[in-house]
Image: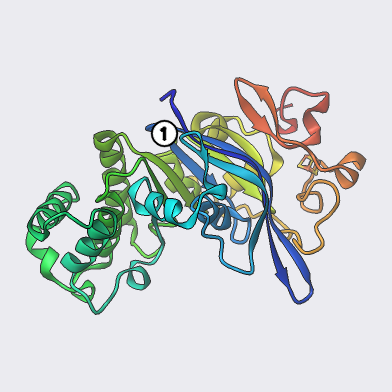
Amino acid sequence: MDEKILEIKNLSIEYPISIGIVQAVKDVSLDLHRGEALGLVGESGCGKSTLGLSILNMVRPPGKIVSGKIVYRGKDILSMRDREILKIRGQNIAMVFQNPLTSLNPLFRIDRQFLETIQQHEPDVPKKDALRRAERILDALGIEQKRLYEYPHQLSGGMRQRIMIGLGLIMNPDIIIADEPTTSLDVIVEAGFIDLLNKLRKEFNLSIILITHNLGLVAEIADRIAVMYGGAIVEEGTAEQIYHDPLHPYTYGLINCVPNINMDQQELITMPGNPPDLVNPPPGCRFEDRCPYVMDICKEQFPPLLSHRDGQKSACWLYKEKEAAPWKS
Ligand code: SF4
């Protein structure tokens, strides 16, 4: 897993709106390695989906990438011409969106949607070969080949989501970005979907970026997790580090919000307060008005994301002098 295939460097994204400018993503840096599954976790509005879209330079106007680089296999995606980026979309990096009903064309059978994807990138492939390729993908997804000749409305929600993954995989990409891919699925189908993603990852040596608010889901698949809050990454580490030894008070709060069936819990623990206003964000830490450990420096200076131990990173002033998280003492 050593080969670095994607590098996001100091990326910032802004959205001008009538009352000001939303600082949706602030100075984010992240790496992705070959065969690695990276979980991008945070509450709604934290900037995780915007960050996912930016990887394919698909931030929706009036949103704008104002600084930074996205380097895929040594080339900056943000400085590529339209023709170059169109080749990369789908062929090298594929995106799976959260609602297959709005992503699949309801008027066309599934075979046509596979054909269009393949012929967009390889116009000379004969129809027969393209269909054979689609049938093989359906086999890998555990879907009967005859389903290829049905319309989206004839398939179940879980099957449609698997078709979306199939459309993402059909060009054998290096990277799949899955944005809340299980939101519309029930828990049983969701578990099957995650097993399938893990299987395909091994089979195709895929790198995966899984964008979700669901910490339980990310635990099933991610090697590494980046936690976002208010447009910035506040903690990054292996799944083991994030779940068992979080450093940032926000990550600790998020983990506490997850119900634990091994504990006799009468009530769910919630995190008080609301995410920050990203039009007028606080000058210091964006979590300061919800943080039980807030100090003077937190209100004045934005905490940088720094490595603390074994590569685990945290953006929190608590670790300027201390090593251990305060909830451990
Ligand atoms: Fe809390 Fe300060 Fe750390 Fe922010 S920087 S999470 S306010 S202790």
Three-letter code for the amino acid on which mark 1 is drawn: Glu
249 is higher (above) or lower (below) than 154: above
Does mark 1's beta carbon lie closer than 8 Å to ligand 1?
A: no
Q: Name the side, left or right, on which 171 lies relative to 60.
A: left
The residue lying at 77 percent from left, 52 percent from top is: 290
Query: Can you give x and y, in whole percent of width and height, for residue 87 in the image?
Result: 37, 52
Q: Quadrant of residue 323?
A: top right
Query: Can you give x and y, in whole percent of width and height, for residue 6 in the image?
Result: 49, 37
The residue identified by callout 1 is: 36
115 is higher (above) or lower (below) than 33: below
Is residue 299 or residue 133 the one in the foreground? 133
The residue lying at 23 percent from left, 72 percent from top is: 152
Few, some or many C-alpha atoms within 10 Å of disc 1 (few <14, some 14-19, many ≥20)? many
- Say if residue 154 shows up in the picture: yes
Instruction: Give the number of callouts.
Output: 1
Is residue 25 or residue 125 the one in the foreground? 125
- Say if residue 253 shows up in the picture: no
Is residue 138 or residue 310 the one in the foreground? 138
